[in-house]
Amino acid sequence: MPHNAPPSTTAPTYNLLDEPWIPVGWTDSRPDLPENVGLRELLLRSHEIARIAVALPPALSALYRILYALTARITELDEAGPGDWGERRLDVVDRGQLEAGAVERVLGRYRPRFDLFDPQRPFLQDPRLVEQCDSQNTAGVNKLITTRPSGNNHAWFRHVSDTAPDLPTCAEAAMHLLVWHYYGPSGRCSSRRVGTVEEANAKAGPLRSTLSYHPEGENLFETLLAGLPQPASTVRRDHDQCPWEWDQLPDPKAAPPQLRGVCSELTARSQHALLLVPDEAGSGVRDAFITWAYRDKIDRTGDPYLIWQTSKDGNPYPRPADSARALWRDLDALLLKNPSGTAQPRRPTVFETASEVSENLRARALGFEQDGQAKDIQFVDASTPPVLGLREDREPLIASEIGRLRAIGEGYGNRLERAAKKAWFLYTDAEKIADCTWAVDAAARYWPGAETEFWRRLDHKDFEGAAKSFRTLAERVYQDVTASAVGTLRGAKACSQARAELYTQHKPPAKAGKARQNLTVEDV
């Protein structure tokens, strides 16, 4: 059973402003530079930091949103005015770094609330859980650390025991605290009693199962400024608050606090309430409470880092994370205002203004392939070369060709999949055309080759004859995958008949499910 003693009133401290919990890579690789920094040093030296080196993609995605909100406050770009917002941001870019006095002012105002173990307002936690939840039935650290199995869930990296868990460091616990707030599952959780309301289930986190896209520059300073969404003209910072800025903790029985601007939209959508229990020395976490934050679902539409799509019923939904889908297949949805696709994808709004900061921005995709509840499948982390300067309003012809190139590559990939499935169906006399060994093998061979061809052509701005190249690749893969069967009359007949699928254009199915819509398939 997990350790169940509640935190004492003299809890140890671990302030995220000062403690070195964030791994970084520096632009100048000197041996005297620290491998990990706190939030204050991260922001003060963002111009010297090449990248945040967090190995957990959903934690980095969540951390970026916290940093965007802090950067907006520090630069006063959290409001549209006074003056032109874009020009004001360029003034910050020209300064080359965040102003030290502004960093100290913003962080210092709420310093105690960045402490993981503050008894009144621990960072992104609810201290009331020690009374509202059953202290004899806590979640435990194996549940807190999202890469560990808990209960009956499968093991990812290693087997662990709930009776004798390895206690995570404070830095590790902080990262997984962020993952829970943004990617936490729906369904069963610890029971929480608030007044007459007692429930033991939670809604899914706002980024659950999604893929998040972020512009990245040559250093963290550029990355944070490029990632700032432009606020609406009606936003006022006194009402657009982050959780650590709230005067009081919210009532879990009431409606969630309203999202009134960029800062609240980035940091206040969590559906989970957590409380970390430190060990006696304060060097690690020995237990955790994890339960519901609100009974009502918080609207997650409008997140500026997601590709939003439209279901057959006309409802918007974010493009799901898919570990088998390479980032080049999403590139036109980041560069074009109205990219093609049956799901009517809309590019993340942050990409509409990101390249004003720099022409040499990359796109970083971060996500977690999951189902809505307990099943976690795979992390997603991928980057493009510096291509965001090719967006449609700057390079309309190239951006359009990128979209066409993606459609051609995807089209032949989907034709190959149909051909492999049909050949297997005819050869094995299966009950129906469905996923099979040949289709899996074909995908494993085709998509890496298609990705190489895509980037080669984009690098050389060579868009002529693309259809022939992708078709030739699909033909070669089909021949290799079915080679073991063509030595028999039955196999040769099946493979020859199914091969026609490589040259047949199909319309998208009339009742495509959400997962298929995610593929934004066009045949060429």
Image: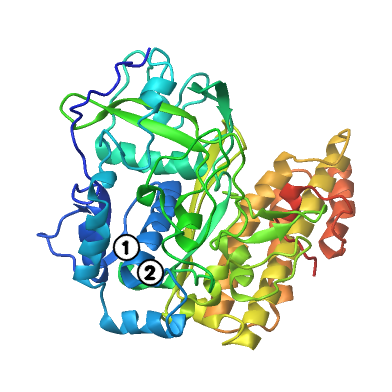
Q: Nearer the viewer, mark 1 or mark 2?
A: 2
- Quadrant where the C terminus is found in the figure: bottom right
Here the colouring is: rainbow
Seen at 50% across and 72% down, the residue is: 230
* Mark earlier in primary sequence (1, 2): 1
Residue 470 coordinates in the image, percent (x, y): 69, 69
Residue underneath mark 1: 51
The answer to the question of whether label 1 and label 2 lie on touching residues, with beta carbons closer than 8 A, is yes
- Using the numbered discs, state the Cα–Cα distance from disc 1 to disc 2 in whole angstroms: 9 Å
**In this orientation, which residue lies closer to the viewer: 405 or 370?**
370
Residue 218 coordinates in the image, percent (x, y): 34, 73
How many other residues sit within 10 Å of disc 2, few (<14), some (14-19) or many (≥20)? many
How many other residues sit within 10 Å of disc 1, few (<14), some (14-19) or many (≥20)? many
Quadrant of residue 424 within the rendered picture: top right
Q: Is residue 1 above or below residue 186?
A: above
Q: Secondary structure at mark 1?
A: strand
